[in-house]
Image (spheres, rainbow, N blue to C red):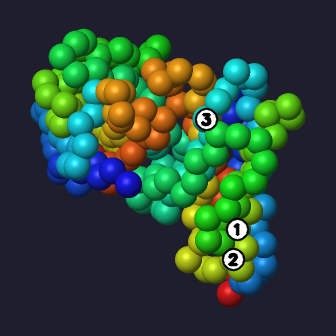
Amino acid sequence: GAVVSQHPSRVICKSGTSVKIECRSLDFQATTMFWYRQFPKQSLMLMATSNEGSKATYEQGVEKDKFLINHASLTLSTLTVTSAHPEDSSFYICSARDFRAGGDAETQYFGPGTRLLVL
Amino acid sequence: QKEVEQNSGPLSVPEGAIASLNCTYSDRVSQSFFWYRQYSGKSPELIMSIYSNGDKEDGRFTAQLNKASQYVSLLIRDSQPSDSATYLCAVKGSGGYQKVTFGTGTKLQVIP
């Protein structure tokens, strides 16, 4: 299966600072990446869909100015949590799909996740 | 109405038994179905995908799909304590760009 990496795996920051999380597809090119958030004992919540070379599509209730997404290449998408607050503490997970001809558009491959703690 | 429904569990089975996990979905035009396993504190990992009615087997895992009943299940034979995790059912509509919708997951506990 395809491999997706995330960096950092864990980050602790002070309230008010910004945190950038990287998501990379290592052995395939991902035209589309997805960002999820998961609070303890809850299910995955899709935050936004990131398309290479275009603006991200945010789910209802997700603040686009707070969660900045950039998908500048076919292998890298970044999520920046701006002015983070304790309530933003969560497990952030990215996933990727390859919509190009010949790619596996059906399957969504997940990164290992980034655990964010805002003090 | 939830789009993908799963019993949250926990589902407890003894080691060596068959664990049966169920999932129903509301969108009749859904075409692709996936089972993911998520260990506590980790991200989901794909176990199986199924696209056609019937059974699909992969090792100890069997996925079953019944599109008429809008029902998909996962059977785990010879359950092991290492199978203890939350199992997520995911459903996608027809067409490559359709969004994948995840259920809330069923927690499985395999008792040694």
Q: Is residue B22 above or below residue B26?
A: below
Q: Which mark is residue B95?
A: none
Residue labelled with disc 2: B79
The residue carrying mark 3 is B32
Badge 1 crowding class, 10 Å Cα cut-off, few under 14, some 14 to 19, many 20 or more, is: some
Measured in 3D between alpha carbons, the distance from the residue under mark 2 to the one under mark 3, in whole angstroms, is 26 Å
Residue at image position (64%, 40%) is B51
Query: How many tags in the picture?
Result: 3
Q: Earlier in the sequence, mark 1 or mark 3?
A: 3
Pinpoint the chain carrying mark 3: B
Q: Position of residue A116 (x, y in %)?
A: 27, 46
Asked if the residues shown at circle 2 and circle 3 are in contact, with their CB atoms under 8 angstroms apart, the answer is no
Which amino acid, by three-letter code, is at mark 2? Answer: Ser
> Please, what is the three-letter code of the amino acid marked with disc 3?
Ser
Badge 2: how crowded within 10 Å, few (<14), some, or many (20+)? many
Which of the two discs, 2 and 3, labels the residue nearer the N terminus? 3
Residue B76: assigned label: 1
Mark 2 and mark 3 on one chain: yes
Q: Chain of mark 2?
A: B
Q: Is residue A85 left or right of residue B81?
A: left
Place of residue A75 in the rendered image (x, y in percent of width and height, measured from the top left): 18, 37
- Depth order, front residue of A90/B9: B9
Label 1 sits on a secondary structure element that is: strand
Does label 3 lie on the same chain as label 1? Answer: yes
State whether discs 2 and 1 lie on one chain: yes
Residue located at (24% from left, 12% from top): A55
| C-alpha separation, residue under disc 1 versus residue under disc 3 | 20 Å
Q: Measuring from the top left, give residue A105's x and y in whole percent.
A: 42, 32
Residue at the spot x=19%, y=31% of the render? A74
